[in-house]
Amino acid sequence: MTTPEPPENHLYAGRWVALVRGKVIAQGATREQAFHAARQARPKERLEIRFMPATPVQSPLLDSVRRLIPADRPVYLVGGAVRDAVLGHTTHDLDFATPPGALQLAKQLADQLPGAYFPLDEDNDTARIVLQHPDGTRDILDFAGFRGETLEADLRGRDFTINALAMDLHTGQIHDPLGGLNDLRAKTLRTCSPTSLSDDPIRILRAIRQAASFGFSIDPATRQLMKTAVPGLTRISPERQRDELFKILAGPKPDASLRALELLGLFPLLLPELTALKGVTQSSPHVHDVWTHTLAVLRHLNSLLEALAPEYNETKANADLFNGLLVLHLGRYRQQISQHLSTSLNTDRPARALLFFAALYHDINKPQTQTTEENGRIRFLGHDEQGAQTAMQRGMALHLSNDELDRLKLLVRLHMRIHFHTSRKLETGSNPSRKAIYRFFREAGEAGISLILLALADQRATYDHTLTQEHWTASLEVSRSLLEAYYEKAEEIIRPPQLLTGHDLINELKMKTSPEIGRLLEALRETQAAGHLATRPEALAFARGWLAKGRDK
């Protein structure tokens, strides 16, 4: 979806505006209103008065759909697609509202575009068309019959005014019965009606997410309605809770969004384990209690991912010394990291969202494992192992897929591993050995990339303003050695080619089928990854020596 007009112009679609040197300084429903408002603000400036066309949404795809729909068939582009176009954002999800008959219309269009047709809800006259493109991207077109007798009734039944916008597909006319365009200009999130949130309490989470995504403030009356509607979350399915929560975690400012959820009192209903983290003190080098530390991990994780994004802002990244060092050490892997985070472990949720969920739960069992030694030092022995089980239980309650649960368990259970290598680096100056790197990825697999990112964010949150450049550089050098092995030396260190098989051991060394064969093969792989074996004869010699010693290496 493309929007050729500058985004600030779309905010005034269908209005008269006054411009000074190309910048909008006033607007109104008529030319005179815009002129007089501008004269009050800039009495001596040279003004340009212009009407902004009420057709903010333009794209080749939309043109194709328009040509295929009969001129006498009312169809409206509604909701987020109109909102995003007005804001100048790109979207590949288009929602259309039409009088009854949306299923039949969508099926006809799917045949003509062409695209894959999916009836989503026959009782509610809702269907989807998926257009798959050669470059791997796809467009999703949803068609639904009016939720009410008329278009206006449909729009008034939506969540927030900024989403209660519609554009006539044939004429381009904008329908805005609730002042959504004004709220977009004012950067305000406001409900469509006093019952919008009680009708569907999942909209509480959506309000937090959209306010963070767009940098909007939530209208005071809407905030009060959100608090009132919180108990209704108990009737929302775990799947819908999960989907909104993961969108919050994968979006901008996840730490601020979680604070907002906490202030609304949602944790006991949504993420009950988090309530115990608040006020749990930690010894040095930690500078925060467990809950504040957790939020700091989310903040730093978001910051470092922004610095490592393919489209990163160099000026912004270098404004933070530690992010500048991050880019210097790991910047060459930004494309691979982006691909890792965008890979889905299921259809709808990228690995990035799961990483943030793991960050939220990485210290979840510290309250249960807290002990104080005689010298006053506070310890949390076993919190990683126990926390992995707790995180799994919450993931199961949210109906995560099995692949997501496996990844989540690994991330929480192993989140301390890289800290050990950083401490060793500071003590000895040595990076992890080839054998240590092999063992790390043997256990973590592809999740090791997420573990590196989580460990870096955890490091920054632990020390926060007390973090030294020396300590951070050690963390980065350890991380670089791991990423370099994974992305540049995988066949040497991570997945070396097999020199011997179990059949070879049976045939050549007369071994019998037993668990000992598996142990020997793993010893061979470790030694090979360490760089001490390169040929089949060397592997056979190693195997004979291993058997002669009668013990594992």
Image (tube, rainbow, N blue to C red):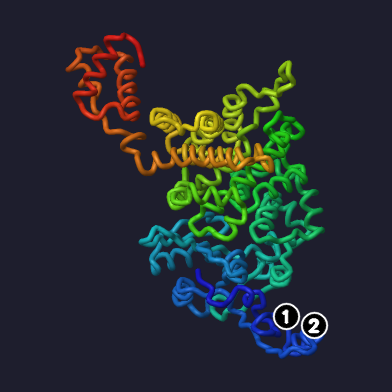
Question: Cα distance, mark 1 to mark 2?
Answer: 8 Å
Q: Quadrant of residue 547?
A: top left
Type of residue at label 1?
Answer: Ile
Q: Residue at x 53, y 48 (%)?
A: 326
Q: SS of the residue at dot 1? A: strand
Number of numbered labels in the structure image: 2
Question: For residue 14, what is the image quadrant?
Answer: bottom right
User: From what the image shows, is residue 479 above or below residue 518?
Assistant: below
Q: x, y (%) of residue 348?
A: 50, 49
Frontmost residue, 376 versus 40 = 376
Give the percent coordinates (x, y) of residue 49.
69, 89
Q: Around disc 2, counting alpha carbons within 10 Å, would you say few (fewer than 14), some (14 to 19), or many (20 or more)?
A: few
Residue matched to label 1: 25
Check the image and report above or below for 242 versus 307: above
Q: Secondary structure at mark 2?
A: helix
Classify the position of the C terminus by image quarter: top left
